[in-house]
Amino acid sequence: MRIILASKSPRRRELMDLAEFNYEILPSSSEEEWDNSLTIEENSKNLGYQKAKSVFDNTQR
């Protein structure tokens, strides 16, 4: 299974290393835009989806 870390976060990389996962780093190129009409939970889900879709779209070419 291919595991992609879609983040430049050093802490997330550290956690992946501690868990001894074999992964690659492909940061998302999507812009993070907060929507004030949504709840914190809805914004978190929306931003996560946008980042994941951006990386997915870039790996399917």
Image (cartoon, grey):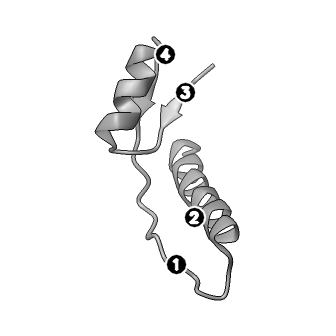
Where does label 1 land, which residue? Answer: 34
Most foreground residue, 26 or 33: 33
Please state, as top left, top right, bottom left or bottom right, where the N terminus lies in the image.
top right
Q: Amino acid at mark 1?
A: Trp
Task: Quickly name the residue at label 3.
Answer: 3
Asked where in the image residue 13 lies, by quadrant, the reply is top left
- Label 1 crowd (10 A; few <14 / some 14-19 / many >=20): few
Alpha carbon distance from label 3 to label 2? 19 Å
> Which badge, 4 or 2, is on the more N-terminal residue?
4
Of label 1 and label 4, which has the lower sequence position? 4
| Badge 2 amino acid | Leu
Q: Earlier along the polypeptide chain: callout 4 or callout 3?
A: 3
Residue bearing the label numbered 4: 21
- Secondary structure under tag 3 reads loop
- Is residue 60 rendered to the left or right of residue 12? right
Report the side of 18 relative to 1 (left or right).
Answer: left
Inspect the image, locate mark 4, and give the three-letter code of the amino acid beneath it.
Phe
The residue that mark 2 highlights is 47
Asked if labels 3 and 4 touch by Cβ distance under 8 angstroms, the answer is yes
Give the residue displayed 70% in from the left and 69% down from the top. 42
- Mark pair 4, 3: CA separation: 8 Å
Mark 3 or mark 2, earlier in chain: 3
Residue 10 rendering spot, x and y as whole percentages: 29, 37
Residue 12 location in percent, x, y? 40, 35
Label 1, label 4: how many angstroms apart (C-alpha)?
A: 31 Å
